Amino acid sequence: MKSAKILLLAMLFVAPVVFAGTVSIQSTGVAIFPGDLFSVDVGVSNISDLYAFQFDLTFDPAIISATAISEGAFLPSSGATFFFPGTIDNIGGAITFNADTLLGAVSGASGSGVLATIQFSALGPGSSPIGLSNVILLDSSLGDISAGVINGSVTVSPEPSNRAPAGLIFMGVFAWIRSRYGVSRRTRPATTYSAQ
Amino acid sequence: MIFSATITTTGGSNNVSPAIGGNAGNVTVNILGQNFSTSTSTTTTVVLRTPGQPDIAGISPQVLSTSQIETAFDLLGASPGVRDLIVTQTGTQPVTFPGSFTIQVGGSAQIGISVLGPSNVRAGRQATFDVVVSNTGIVDAPFVSVQASDPVSSAFGPGAAAQALGCALPSQTTYVSAMRVQIFPLTCTPQGSSCATINASAQKNQSPRDCSTLEALVQKLTQQLRSLYTAFYNLLFQLNDLKAQFENRCLPAPGPQDAEFCIEAGIQIAILQSQLQFLNEQITQVEVDLLIAQSQLDICLRGQQQGNSSTLTTTTATSSSTASVPPTSANASLQFCGVTSVDPNAKLGVSGAGQAQYVTGGVPLAYTVLFENLPAATAAASQVVVTDTLDAALDPSTVSINSIRFGATDIELPPGSVNFTVSQDLRPNVNLIVEIVAQLAGSTLTVTFTSLDPATYEPPNDLRGFLPPDTSPPAGEGSISFTVKPKNGLATGMQIRNAATVVFDTNAPINTPTWLNTIDNTNPTSSVTSLGASQNSPNFTVQWQGADVGSGLRDFTIYSSRDGGSFVPWLINTTLSQATFTGQVGHAYRFYSIARDAVGNIENAKSTPEATTTVQAGIPGDLNGDGRVDCTDIAIVKAAFGTSAGDPKYDVRADVNGDGVVDIRDLAYVSQHLSPVRACP
């Protein structure tokens, strides 16, 4: 009996929290170098009856800089929406109060998809965490939907050594060599997004 | 100290002061009469009486003199109307003051504060500032606290003292710091009596300002500028010489032997021009730096002579005696500047409101006449005569000399002191007796200080005098402080000017500057803007406005009533002109406003509402109450999205769920009720 109690307690402690869905940072898998423009999706998976959502997003402003936010396709798949792009703060490294809601008395969206897409510009080499916070998911009864959150990160690779600052003349020469001999950026060391 | 005083009393209809009181709290009353028994074995009772109503007994009557009794009545909830006041002392017949007191509905305390003090203080000297607190309301102001502070200089010493004028002495005077003095609590009786004067010594910072750093900087920059100009002109001369040679040998075309010279000269000219340009920029910069440094030095040197400007700020506040009486507060400030030389003979008065120094006619005006035997004087002053001819707008029968000071002597006098003789024995420090005679003849108040030989009680035959040259301040300084009420019924805008003359022994009279105040006897007016018959949201905006002739509006108290109930203060002494009222669905609300002007005049009491409305069960999501949920409602949420209560852009209408944050929960709520469904910008 005693061992059964211990087993029950152990099960309680180790039982995973079950969410009705997951909101995550999703990568596009391309390599990034300083000066590149790239995008990050905020996605949702295994959700049911999503009527409205809101989230904040944080990043390292020394590594990347946000340029735009656009609505994802997931929520509009269930009807007309009102999308409210968040406020970009490239000094503090945050985009706050990104929000989207369906309009009228309709059912919410179910399944998986992209909630919003954030455009970034790579500033310098390094790794920037991309965090989600203040995440609110509401169903068509305007009740909260519990959801797990998976943050991500992005790594910006340094320029190859032959692109080290050596004056505009040399940069022009390298540009000519690249065009002449087909040396592309894809041959440089790869950089990827990763979920944390 | 030998002291004798004759207290003048008033008779007739003014025997009870104040003659009115509000039924919202306690009201302290002074009864003036004759032959009151001051014996401790005598029991004194005072009641307010009218047929059909219970007597209202005075609380712990105090027989202050044979002519004055003070007591307080608890009028909270008492039936309004005229009352007889009856004084009974054991062994004597009751004395009735028929119809001498009227109980009014409501009312409140309205305290005011003003600072009297010199606008110029001699650098390094102490000065005295009087802080006068008054209550122009019709209910006692209990638990009044007063704070005086000077944020710039060390203003107060531990000797900060308090003097009572017609009400209880403050029970506690706290020396908080060199910057702040706190007096608490006072009870200020209603109807305009100045109830306390706090004497604080303000002292300018005695440490002289150090201007040596700025002087060195100016010297350095001047030298630098001189060197730059020297270098500039040297180069300029070189350039001009070279240019002249170049023009001779190279223009219009160089000869074969000059070709090399012309090339080198051309390059050298370019270099010299470049160097001159650089020097010119440096000169400009140094000139600007020197200008700034010189200006700072001038200010610093002036400051050495004049000291810094400083501001004495006072605030006073009272707690409410009942839930229906709003607490009140007031503040005043006086800017003064330290200077090396000031006119020692000055007339100070109530600072009042605004440039015209508005005062309300119900409050006695306080004046102080200052005089000084200058440090350079060759002898002590034996006799000083101060004469103050009161303005025709002032009521001589209300003059009350409150204090007389000279040297280290400070004589505080009871209320109403006006015709009296006071003798002050200066022995053993000085072998003199000073006789001070105060007389009011018509509208001329004269106070005469006379030095007397103790042996003969006659003026001394030698150079002895009570006021020595002021080489060790304040030994050679003196002052007289008194209050006097403006006459009743003065028109708003009436100017009251007052000045005094001071005569030292046989010298020519010295005229003090004239002090000006302007009367504001007009109550302000205000009203709440009418509201729609119904509100779709429990949170709706209430607006009000007001006007005032004279000193200008200070603030408003907005009263509200729910479902026909009694009016209670919603916003107290607010300077806003609108605010969001939070009601409840299904209830009716009424509003009116009471304005207060800068001198404390209160708008006449109101009994009828100025705005009435009912909060109806609104359409869900209809934030602007236009009867539909559309993109304009979405726009309200959008404009405030992401804000929290307290943020400038926060809109309580957009916070649909009232959680203090405008977020997706509010946006989704309105979006869900959008009809017809369509995209919103």
Image (cartoon, coloured by chain):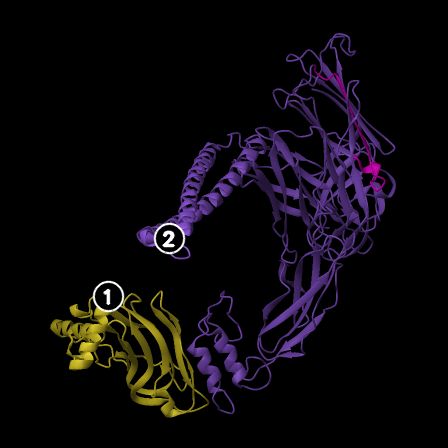
Please give the range of residues in magenta.
Answer: B379-399
Location of mark 1 (residue): A167
Q: Is residue A42 left or right of residue B5?
A: left
Which quadrant of the structure image shows residue B563?
Answer: bottom right
Q: Nearer the viewer, residue A107 or B155?
A: B155
Look at discs 1 and 2 and give the one toward the viewer.
Answer: 2
Q: Nearer the viewer, residue B320 or B393?
A: B393
Q: Position of residue B479 (x, y in %)?
A: 70, 28
Secondary structure beneath label 1: loop
Crowd tier of the residue under label 2, counting other residues whose Cα lies within 10 Å: few below 14, some 14–19, many 20 or above: few
Q: Is residue B669 above or below residue B308?
A: below
Q: Nearer the viewer, residue B23 or B549?
A: B549
Secondary structure beneath label 2: helix
Q: Is residue A110 left or right of residue B427?
A: left
Classify the position of the N terminus of chain B by image quarter. Answer: top right
| Label at residue B579 | none
Q: Is residue B491 left or right of residue B645?
A: right
Colour chain A is painted in: yellow
Location of mark 2 (residue): B270
Q: Position of residue B221 (x, y in %)?
A: 44, 38
Which quadrant of the structure image shows residue B542?
Answer: bottom right
Task: State the residue at coordinates (64%, 12%).
Answer: B428
Colour chain B is painted in: purple
Pointer 1 indicates a residue of which chain? Answer: A
* Residue B285 makes an appearance in the image: yes
Task: State the residue at coordinates (60%, 45%).
Answer: B315
The kind of residue tagged 1 is Gly
Q: Nearer the viewer, residue B192 or B644?
A: B644
